[in-house]
Image (cartoon, rainbow, N blue to C red):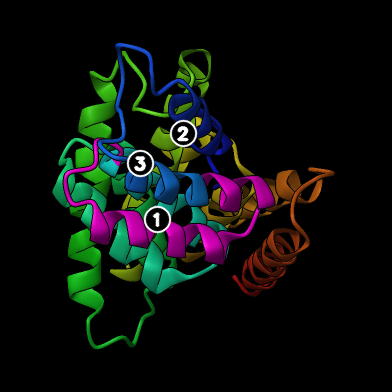
Amino acid sequence: MKFLGLAMSFMAVLLAAQQPQGPKPKSQKEVDALQKVQAAVQAGNYDAELQAINYVLENFADTEYKNMLLNMAVDAAQAKGDYAQTVTFGEQAIQADPSNILARTTVAQSIAGHARENDLDKDQSIKKVREYANKALELLKSADAPPPGIPPDRWPALKKQLTGQAYDALGLAADLEHKFPEAVDDFKNAVNDDPAPVAQAHLAKAYVDNKQYDDAIATADKVLAISDAPAVVKQYAQQQKAAATKLKGAK
């Protein structure tokens, strides 16, 4: 999930640095370093963006842009599919601001999506997913104002999206523990808040695991009917439909 508002708001904040409110650079060297971040964002170069953000964080420890830059780094790392950097920057962002909803949700989903049945650290991964996702849900309930870098008019829809993603992460964790009824409930909550194709496909699998084969087939069909659903998600949904159909016939 790429929060474009973060990058655009960062550039707006940087350009308005002379205004009395908001963060400000403390030296011309910091301005120059921040402008390199801005240039990388404008070029859509995630590697350059991460490198430029790292430079600011390492050389200007007291920068007032720290939290926004960390959120941008999480965002860029996730967009380029770098799991390790997504989690590393996400945990830095949470350490810097324990109420960081964006980081908590992203890290929870990243770990949940990356964890596998036979991982030696599976239990630790599940524990982290639950910690980050449950805290994100708790914070979302009282989060009337958007995090820094998110336009206020986007916040109501984004709150629902983040809520759905937190529940999706919890569903994946429950599935890993073979707590299939719990996984079904979590994925249903995810879909209620954010009917993303991937969450619906996860729900279809949970139904299969919970031996609710008719529900699995119906849910998979919904995913297959979404015209703009990613091909890989449709393929996954088709696999769940096939599994449910076969298992239903074997009863």
Q: Measured along the vertical axis of the image, is residue 65 above or below residue 246?
A: above
Element type at mark 1:
helix
Label 1, on which residue? 53
Answer whether labels 2 and 1 touch (C-beta < 8 Å).
no
Query: Does residue 234 appear in the picture of this structure?
Result: yes
Residue 10: mark = 2
Closer to the eye: label 3 or 2: 3
Type of amino acid at the residue the image marks with label 2: Phe
Residue 75: give x, y in percent of width and height. 47, 50
63 within the magenta span: yes
Q: Measured along the vertical axis of the image, is residue 11 above or below residue 86?
A: above
Magenta segment boundaries in residue numbering: 38-65
Instruction: In this rendered view, identify the residue nearer to me: 81 or 168.
Output: 81
- Residue drawn at x 38%, y 68% is 85
Instruction: In this rendered view, identify the residue nearer to me: 160 or 23.
Output: 23
Could you tell me how far apart the alpha carbons at marks 3 and 2 are, in whole angstroms?
17 Å
Type of amino acid at the residue the image marks with label 1: Ile
Residue 28: mark = 3
Earlier in the chain: of badge 2 and badge 1, it is 2
Q: Measured along the vertical axis of the image, is residue 95 above or below residue 142?
A: below
- Residue drawn at x 24%, y 65% is 126
- Residue drawn at x 69%, y 70% is 239
Closer to the eye: label 3 or 1: 3
Element type at mark 2:
helix
- Residue drawn at x 28%, y 69% is 177
Is residue 102 rendered to the left or right of residue 113?
left
Q: Measured along the vertical axis of the image, is residue 112 above or below residue 151?
A: below
Earlier in the chain: of badge 3 and badge 1, it is 3
